[in-house]
């Protein structure tokens, strides 16, 4: 939006680059389309947001800040996606930000009325990051439909905290924020559920990781790259071979998300 500069928080927020000065942490909001990400974003930021495009892309990025117990966190609204694996710009942006932008926490907003479908994305995010909180939103709508969600059992299954919310009515948002902050502070430990595959797959992943580490020593998640290579992801392979993945991994958070290298490299858009 062109009128960012008139916002009272402008000096503290400042797009287009992700400027984290003055913030105690960065929180990303991911989720399938229409699950209430923007509703959560607006509630937490009090509608104070800066929007611009993701650098080099036509996809809108909304950033805002929220305060919790005298600390300030930057909140980044990622594009709504069903997956992090395909070739769409939105999926690449979300994936690159979670992987290379290394937010201190990623909230995956899910729809309680069709949770199973949403868990596909949750599991993919868990492959990439262990700093994840699952927000089961639209819990009011689920109740209306006779669907009960056992957040505690789901949390045990996923290995990360799960918080039920009805964001439009502001229900559960304080617990969500507290959980995010506790996770950032290390008071909550996670053990994300990850796909292990069969023995041969595991052996291949184990064999690949040190080779990837050699080529791109600072990669935040070589295991994920190994899995993508085994899955035949040609853009990841090209990015690794060309050295772009290594260059990307070596950068700091700010400049990292100025490019979405796996898109830039891949050709298919
Ligand atoms: N009943 C109910 N409706 C909600 C809740 N949260 C959001 N909504 C509604 O769900 C719709 C989608 O919400 P958004 O916040 O726009 O969802 P989004 O994930 O940002 O959607 P995209 O950006 O299009 O992917 C809106 O009509 C919201 O008012 C909730 O907890 N309960
Ligand atoms: Mg939205």
Image (cartoon, rainbow, N blue to C red):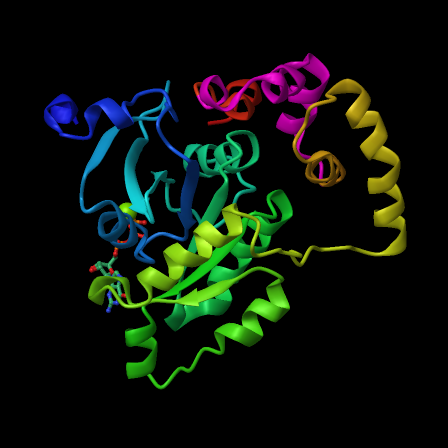
Residue 203: x and y in percent read: 89, 45
- Please tell me whether residue 232 belongs to the stretch shown in magenta: yes
The answer to whether residue 161 is above or below residue 209 is below
Pick the quarter of the image with the N terminus.
top left
The kind of secondary structure the magenta stretch mainly shows is: helix
Say whether residue 49 is left or right of residue 92: left
Residue 67: x and y in percent read: 30, 44
The answer to whether residue 172 is above or below residue 195 is below
Residue 242: x and y in percent read: 68, 13
The answer to whether residue 253 is above or below residue 115 is above
> What span is colored magenta in the figure?
231-257
Q: How many marks?
A: 0
Say whether residue 92 is left or right of residue 78: right
Residue 33: x and y in percent read: 35, 52
Q: Residue at x 56, y 23 (%)?
A: 266
Say whether residue 91 is left or right of residue 153: left
Residue placed farthest to the front in the image? 70
Nearest the camera: 206 or 25?
A: 25
Nearest the camera: 117 or 155?
A: 155
Residue placed farthest to the bottom in the image? 146
Q: Residue at x 16, y 25 (%)?
A: 4
- Please tell me whether residue 193 belongs to the stretch shown in magenta: no
Q: Residue at x 79, y 55 (%)?
A: 197
Q: Quadrant of ligand 1?
A: bottom left
Q: Residue at x 84, y 48 (%)?
A: 201
């Amino acid at each position: 939006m062109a009128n960012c500069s008139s916002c009272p928080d402008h000096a503290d927020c400042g797009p287009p680059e992700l400027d984290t000065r003055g913030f105690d942490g960065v929180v990303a909001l991911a989720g399938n389309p229409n699950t209430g990400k923007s509703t959560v974003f607006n509630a937490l930021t009090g509608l104070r947001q800066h929007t611009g495009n993701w650098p080099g892309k036509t996809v809108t990025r909304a950033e805002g800040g929220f305060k919790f117990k005298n600390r300030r966190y930057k909140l980044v609204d990622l594009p709504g996606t069903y997956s992090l694996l395909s070739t769409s710009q939105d999926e690449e942006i979300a994936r690159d930000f979670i992987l290379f932008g290394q937010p201190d926490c990623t909230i995956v907003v899910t729809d309680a009325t069709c949770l199973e479908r949403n868990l596909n994305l949750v599991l993919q995010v868990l492959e990439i990051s262990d700093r994840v909180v699952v927000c089961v939103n639209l819990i009011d709508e689920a109740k209306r439909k006779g669907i009960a969600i056992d957040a505690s059992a789901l949390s045990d299954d996923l290995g990360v905290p799960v918080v039920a919310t009805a964001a439009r009515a502001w229900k559960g948002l304080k617990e969500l924020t507290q959980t995010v902050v506790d996770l950032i502070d290390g008071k909550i430990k996670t053990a994300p559920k990850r796909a292990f595959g069969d023995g041969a797959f595991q052996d291949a992943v184990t064999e690949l990781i040190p080779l990837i580490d050699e080529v791109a020593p600072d990669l935040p998640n070589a295991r994920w790259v190994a899995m993508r290579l085994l899955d035949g992801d040609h853009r990841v392979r090209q990015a690794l071979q060309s050295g772009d993945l290594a260059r990307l991994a070596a950068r700091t958070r700010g400049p990292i998300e100025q490019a979405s290298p796996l898109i830039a490299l891949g050709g298919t858009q």
